[in-house]
Every structure is written in C-alpha cells, then in structure tokens.
Image: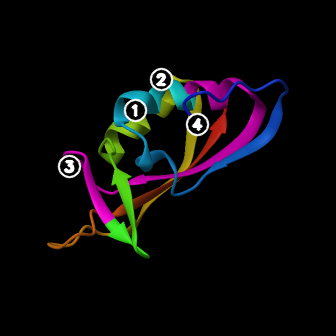
Amino acid sequence: METFAPDEEYDGAVVWDALFHIPREHHESILRTVLRSMRKGSTLILTVGGSEHPPFTDTMFGQTFFYDSHAPVVVLEILRSLGTIVEHAETINLPTSGRDKGRYGIVACVA
C-alpha cells in the first residue's frame, strides 16, 4: 500500500482491515494516493483502529500481525482535509480491556 501507484481512475476503493497494519505515519499519504486515483463522486470504504494506542503486535491464526492507527477522529479530519465528504462513520467494535483495541468503519465520498 505504501508504494501503490495507480495508473487509472477508479469508481471506488475498499481499504478494509488493512490500513492499521501499516505505521500511522504513512496513513495520510496512502489515503491521499487512493483518493487521487478515484473519480469525483466515487466512494471510499475503510476501517481504522477504534482507539489510539501505541503501535503493537499480536498473534492471530499463528501469525504475528502489526497494528497502528490514529484515533477515529483524527482519520475523519484527514479524510475531510483530503477533500472527502464523510457519509457514514461508526464504531464496528468497541475497544476492550484486553487485546482488542476496537475497529471503526468509514464511508466517504470524493468531492
């Protein structure tokens, strides 16, 4: 995702359960690249972490995964600053006191 170089325009994009596996310092540039590749009026659907925590790793299905995310409010501001209209945003699952840091879903339209 960090090296995605689109060579055409798209009618939509899905970035589901993916962005939070990349260090947060790359999130804005990734979103900018994705949004620049999308036609006006198209839809972006994505998930981000449901809370802001330091980066961490965890194990799932016997594999180690990296996690990092801005808080949802920060991601919403990034999307608005990149020229999207947020159509819908909601918590998919709340953070727990355990390993689950939560997940937040966003639907945004390219203005």
Label 1 vs label 3: CA separation? 18 Å
Residue kind at label 2, given as amino acid type: Ser
Label 1 – label 4 distance at C-alpha: 21 Å
Circle 1/circle 4 CB separation < 8 Å: no
Residue 3, position as x, y percentages in the image: 60, 27
Q: Considering only vertical position in the picture, is 68 above or below 90?
A: above
Asked which secondary structure carries label 3, the reply is loop
Is residue 41 shown in magenta? yes
Amino acid residing under circle 1: Glu
Q: Which residues are magenta?
A: 32-58
Residue, x 49% and y 30% (percent of image)?
Answer: 80
Of 25 and 72, nearer the camera is 25
- To which residue does mark 1 refer? 77
Q: Position of residue 24 (x, y in %)?
A: 36, 36
> Label 2 to label 4, Cα distance in Å?
20 Å
Q: Which mark is residue 81?
A: 2
**Tags 1 and 2 in contact by the CB under 8 Å rule?**
yes
Q: Residue furthest left?
A: 97
Q: Amino acid at mark 3?
A: His
Residue drawn at point x = 24 percent, y = 48 percent: 52
Dividing the image into 4 quarters, which one contains the N terminus? top right
Q: Is residue 107 above or below residue 86?
A: below
- Rendered residue at 34%/51% (across/down): 67
Residue 48 as seen in the image, left or right of residue 98: right
Q: Mark 1 falls on what kind of element?
A: helix
According to the picture, the residue beneath numbered tag 4 turns out to be 1
